Amino acid sequence: MRPELEIISAWIEPNTRVLDLGCGDGALLAYLAAHRQVSGYGLEIDTANLLACIQAGVNVIHADLEAGLADFGDGSFDYVLMTQTLQAVRHTEALLDEMLRVGRQGIVTFPSFGFWRYRLQIAMQGLMPVGKTLPYQWYDTPNVHLFTIRDFEQLCRRKGIAILQRTVLDHSHRIRRGPQLWPNLLGEIALYRLGRL
Amino acid sequence: MPSTFPSDSVGPVSPQVAHFAEPLALDCGRSLADYQLVYETYGVLNSDSSNAVLICHALSGDHHVAGYYQDADSAKPGWWDNCIGPGKPIDTRHFFVVCCNNLGGCKGSTGPTSINPDSRKPYGPDFPIVTVKDWVHSQARLADRLGIRQWAAVIGGSLGGMQAMQWAITFPERLRHAVVIAAAPRLSAQNIAFNEVARQAILTDPDFHHGHYYEFGVVPRRGLMIARMLGHITYLSDEGMRTKFGRELRETGAPNFHFNFDSEFQVESYLRHQGRAFVDRFDANTYLLITKTLDYFDPAADFAEDLSAAFAQTRARFLVISFNTDWRFSPARSREIVRALVRAGRETSYAEVPSEHGHDTFLMPIPLYHDILRSYLTRVAQEIGDAA
């Protein structure tokens, strides 16, 4: 989580308003509030996470992302964040649209299914991939859409979403040269800053 | 009163009275020349008076929120005792807790049962209909009297939550936090309709005597009882009633229906009991008055019907809580409040707590609900500790 926090934090202008979709225990928002003086809210469906946010003093709103973001006005946030969440929602496209309706920019991170180790697991063992970023078995995973970096970028092109910035982390979750050159093979986690074309 | 108290109880308590000789101008255009508020406090006010918490009561509540009365024959503590006390979510080791019976009430604060100085008889129906805003102004005077410039938090459920909202709007600088539980930004037509049926039950009781029943030595028992029974249905959920009563008959093992109108089902006897018990502890004119207070509450009305404009001037941080089976003030109503707060750029958190108990959940020690309150208020206590 740490490298992700730092990368996202560096992308965000200080003193801005952010909305974090699926904010978990609020660690990212707390980090951004401390380091970038952002204000905003997290949306979260899980009550244990909700409680953790309240304990951390993070503004959290109990909400189901699948129901959309109708409570939020157009362009009402500078950034809408979705870290490690997109693969776990059913209405992927609708949520991306909502994200860039409500936010001037979107920041998305996800585990890439195209990571070479995952490819090997399927190719060699014939088993669904399990690893650091995909820690679940096929039968208990909350992830309903698994996709690769190339998949995601194709979708962005088709939807007219501009990729303003991309960083790919390798297995050690560090920024290295290799994954930037061959992201779809060597990237285990992808981070994007998105906007409207 | 029990001879010993649980260790997390505030213990024996007694009400206090504050008289106010300065006239209070009311929303209705009239004013109260002289009035009193009866209130209770628990915990200790700190040296900079920054740890005070105001609890606002709902329709049938009063100032006795926690602890036990010395002279009471019943062992029942105040109405929110499960939430207030040392180690409880509203922790009296950190906070100085204040609650007053609202104006127009019938538990000691000036209201319809008080003597009208002009007529030397009880006000009855002549007592002015007060609004949530009037209450907040009167509570602010009590705060002045107690030396509290700013509340650490104003907390309330249902109509109490409406007072917390109004506090944030009317006196932005006088509270740090507003905790709004199972409330609504204003009543729906359905809410008002239920209130109207309750009022009609009282108004049409032959013992009502246009509200001057005190002079006739009677009370409109039937009307008030029906009003309370109706209210009670709206406080519970279909699911909760099914779990609690189902279609159980009163007489266990009774093989047949009686084919008459005596109370046969458990739910009937429960409602009748609730209605009867209420008549003995509540005044019909106060009930009428407070249902109107509810109907009139609409903070957006002063801001061209824009609730977010009403919240734009607030400074408090909000915690909004709803309960999933509450249909009196449903989660959708709480989300209206949250949406307006977000649009106004105000700091807020929101939780929808699962519970089968409907609107009444706000009085119950549901673990997640109390954990949320406790976590939030722990932060509030830290904050005022840091500021001191």
Image (spheres, coloured by chain):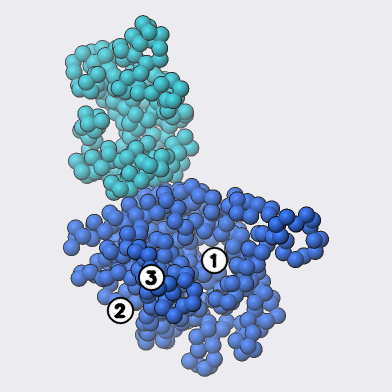
Chain colours: A cyan, B blue
* Residue hosting label 2: B145
CA gap between label 3 and label 1 equals 42 Å
N-terminal of the pair, mark 2 or mark 1, is 2
> Are there few (<14), some (14-19), or many (20+) residues within 10 Å of tag 1?
some
Q: Mark 2 — on which chain does it sit? A: B
Q: Are marks 3 and 1 on the same chain?
A: yes
Q: Splitting the image into 4 quarters, where does residue B50 fall? A: bottom left
**Residue in the picture at 55% in, 76% down:** B282
User: Label 1 amino acid?
Assistant: Asp
**Residue in the picture at 59% in, 72% down:** B277
Q: Are marks 2 and 1 on the same chain?
A: yes
CA gap between label 3 and label 2 equals 33 Å
**Residue in the picture at 79% in, 57% down:** B257
Q: Nearer the viewer, residue B78 or B330?
A: B78
CA gap between label 2 and label 1 equals 30 Å
Secondary element at image label 3: loop
> Are there few (<14), some (14-19), or many (20+) residues within 10 Å of tag 2?
few
**Of tags 2 and 1, which is closer to the observer?**
2
Query: Is the C-beta separation of discs 2 and 1 under 8 Å?
Result: no
Is residue B140 visible in the rendered structure shown here?
no
Residue B350 locus on image (x, y percent): 40, 49
* Residue hosting label 1: B295
* Residue hosting label 3: B4
